[in-house]
Image (cartoon, rainbow, N blue to C red):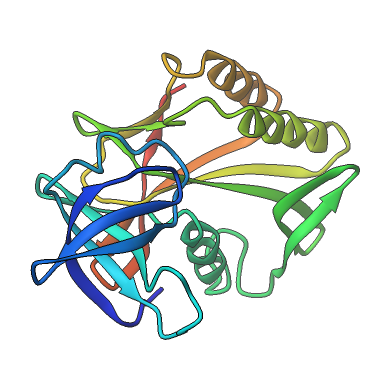
Amino acid sequence: MKYENIEPAIFLERPNRFIAYVEQAGKRQICHVKNTGRCRELLLPGCEIYVQRQENPARKTPLDLIAVKKGEKLINMDSQIPNRVVEEWLRKGNLFGADARIRTECRFGNSRFDFYVEAGERRIFMEVKGVTLEENGMARFPDAPTERGVKHVQELAACRKEGYEAYLFFVIQMKGISFLEPNDKTHPAFGEALRRAAAEGVHILAYDCIVKPDTIEMDQKTEVCL
């Protein structure tokens, strides 16, 4: 996945979930934050970031916040990108083969999952979660309580009971990660739901990504420790 019009900037402050103020060439500018998570360990005053300049003159915020430097790590924090990265990766024949038929935003009962895949006789539902929280080389999810995330995990387990395959796919939006684990301290209910779903046959996968200021690409499978 490649971005256009990427520029460096310095993060100043984030007055709410949706906007931040950044500095470019000594000028203070408003920027849209494409991640409504807390990201408190990432967005520190004075840190280096990368923003995407939008060419739509009607927009109130001409910039989107795409990536942030945390020490030596470059972390993509665009919450809209994990699904696109996974779709691009699947359509190259990864995981389910080159002949797999892939559909996005598909319903199962009252639920809507990111992907539905048919590969031969296999029928598969998949939900994708982006991961930006890193602590001492470990990735953790979620970075804030997510009742929606718990619901998705429970619904994937319901798919399994109806005979479908089910996958929860964590896209770690950085490199240099030893393993991923549920963030039980922040949201124990999510960890409990994840372990229960795994015991019921839901596949739990995690892959890290090669991140550059203007690109993000799926790379290597990462161990999941439940």
Toward which corner of the image does residue 24 lie, by quadrant?
bottom left
Q: Is residue 65 left or right of residue 144?
A: left
Above/below status of 68 relative to 222: below
- Image point 51% across, 18% down: which residue? 187
Q: Nearer the viewer, residue 63 or 212?
A: 63
The answer to whether residue 162 is seen in the rendering is yes
Q: Is residue 136 left or right of residue 62?
A: left
Q: Is residue 113 left or right of residue 220?
A: right
- Image point 22% across, 59% down: which residue? 22
List x then y, in percent, for residue 41. Answer: 25, 34
List x then y, in percent, for residue 61. Answer: 41, 68
List x then y, in percent, for residue 9. Answer: 17, 64
Q: Nearer the viewer, residue 46 or 50?
A: 46
Above/below status of 151 relative to 81: above
Toward which corner of the image does residue 186 lie, by quadrant?
top left
What is the quadrant of the N terminus in the image? bottom left
Q: Is residue 155 left or right of residue 44?
A: right
- Image point 65% across, 21% down: which residue? 199
- Image point 43% across, 22% down: which residue? 183
List x then y, in percent, for residue 83. Answer: 55, 59
The answer to whether residue 208 is seen in the rendering is no
Above/below status of 46 relative to 52: above
Q: Nearer the viewer, residue 2 or 165?
A: 2
